[in-house]
Amino acid sequence: MKKYVPLLAAIVIVVVLAILASTSCSSQPQQEIPQEEIPTSTENLTQSMNIYYSASQGYLVPITRQVASSDNMAQAALDLLHDTSANWTDASSLGVMPTLPEGATATVSVSGGIAQVDLSGFVCTDADSEKLAISSMTATLLDMPQIDVVHYTVNGKAAALLPFGTSIADTVTSLAVNAEQEALSVSAGESVSQVRLAFYDSANDLLVPVTRSVTGSNDLSAIMTELAKGPAEGSTLTSAIPESCELLGVSKTEDTAIIDMSESFSNLSAQEMTTAA
């Protein structure tokens, strides 16, 4: 029996050493396996922006575009308005036109809500196109949430007027897009406000924003009443709401506008109803 003791002891020692070796290995910190980093690409990221192009009869029309994200989205927006062959091809497919004159540059920087636009080579063909170009840039920039004020310079210097007389001396905080020129009769004590309406350009299948001055309140009911009146006399635009449809009432619940139309509204075609709505 004694001759088996050394063998038994050897077995016990081997088992103990194996356990100790296992314990020693498990107590060491595990080496982290480096994970392959997958680069994040921003090339395909875009932002939705309203770009104010020129349409027929000199109207400005906002077209919602998906613009590639960049550090200067204001510049990216204005770049779409330059008179280049690529911009013409792109805009004309939408029934609109770029507004900045050929060879002109408009460099913009934004800080603290102020968009500083410096113009160079800004030579238009007439006063109307000059005014339209400035209004186009101003409207586009003021539609951006990070911009409250637009100011212009020419070749890095302050300027009061452009060659055809468009004033750029003052900073701009708001713009009456496509303002109607009808005279407004105002009684003593009455207030005047502006409302933005949308009428239809059938030639280009576009909805055109129009700014109308009204007396009294400019609440939702007043706005819808003005919309139901249709465009000003002599306008090339038409109402998107057919004459057969009558506005019966308007109400508002929290952030929801409820527009009550006559039964004939439900008889419109899908396209007519979409445009009217």
Image (cartoon, grey):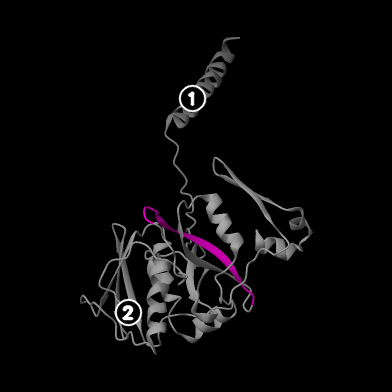
Q: Main secondary structure of the magenta part?
A: strand
Q: Position of residue 233 (x, y in %)?
A: 56, 73
**First in sequence: mark 2 vs mark 1:** 1
At label 2, counting other C-alpha atoms closer than 10 Å, the crowd grade (few under 14, some 14-19, many 20 or more) is some
Residue drawn at point x = 53 percent, y = 78 percent: 55
In reply to whether residue 150 is colored magenta, the answer given is no
Q: Which residues are magenta?
A: 188-202
Q: Residue furthest left?
A: 157
Q: Residue furthest front?
A: 188
In reply to whether residue 197 is colored magenta, the answer given is yes
Q: Quadrant of residue 171?
A: bottom left
Tag of residue 100: none
Depth check, front residue: 128 or 145: 128
Residue drawn at point x = 38 percent, y = 82 percent: 130
| Residue to which mark 2 is pinned | 166
Depth check, front residue: 113 or 165: 165
Q: Residue furthest right?
A: 267
Tag of residue 17: 1
Does residue 235 appear to the left or right of 242 in the view shown? left
Compared to residue 215, the image places residue 207 above or below, namely below
Q: Quadrant of residue 101?
A: bottom left
Q: Quadrant of the C terminus?
A: bottom right
